[in-house]
Image (cartoon, rainbow, N blue to C red):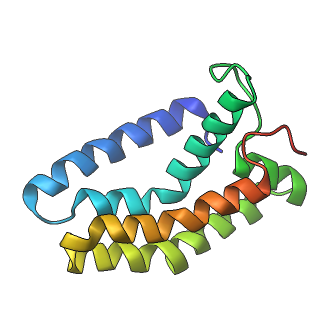
Amino acid sequence: FMGDGCSVFIGFVLGIFALITPCTNHINIWTWLILSGYFIVDATVTLIVRFFRREKIYESHRSHAYQILSRRLNSHAKVTIGILILNIVWLLPFAVLSVIFPLYGFLFLLISLVPLVFLVLKIGAGTTND
């Protein structure tokens, strides 16, 4: 909920880290993708659903899962805390496993993100759901 200016900058910085750390053999790319999983899934599913609904995907909208939830719950704080808990309880263990067992990183990525696809679809990502 930082707006485009700040979120683009933070995304750029995290992207640079994600590209640098695999070169140093500290964290692999699968770990970064898992840790960014909720945001990747919400954005990707939203765009795909909007594309198939024949909406202009380049126009502003309020159809990301987090936006729908914040309207339903009438609280950005509850949604932010929920995403934080999701990241710690669900995604972080898979990220740790992807560091310990890097050969299985892609498998951990799939196992961790597929349920999130169903979650954001159930919430209504990409729809004008209020």
Reply above or below: 24 against 102.
above
Counting the numbered discs, the total is: 0
Left or right, 67 with reference to 29: right
Compared with 98, 53 (above or below) is above
Percent of width and height locating residue 27 = 21, 64
Q: Residue at x 67, y 68 (%)?
A: 81
Q: Quadrant of the N terminus?
A: top right
Query: Which residue is depicted at the point 74% across and 23% down?
Result: 55
Looking at the rendering, which quadrant does residue 130 occupy?
Answer: top right
Q: Is residue 45 above or below residue 77?
A: above
75 relative to 86 in the view: left or right: right
- Left or right of 58 in this view: 102: left
Image coords of residue 97 (percent x, y): 31, 79
**As drawn, 128 above or below 93:** above
Q: Within the image, what quadrant is residue 99 found in?
A: bottom left
Left or right: 45 in relation to 12: right
Residue 63 drawn at (x, y percent): 76, 39
Front residue of 28/112: it is: 112
Q: Residue at x 26, y 73 (%)?
A: 104
Residue at coordinates 43% horizontally, 75% vertically from top-left? 92
Residue 87 pos. (x, y %): 52, 70
Residue closer to the observer: 107 or 64 = 107
Residue, far front: 52
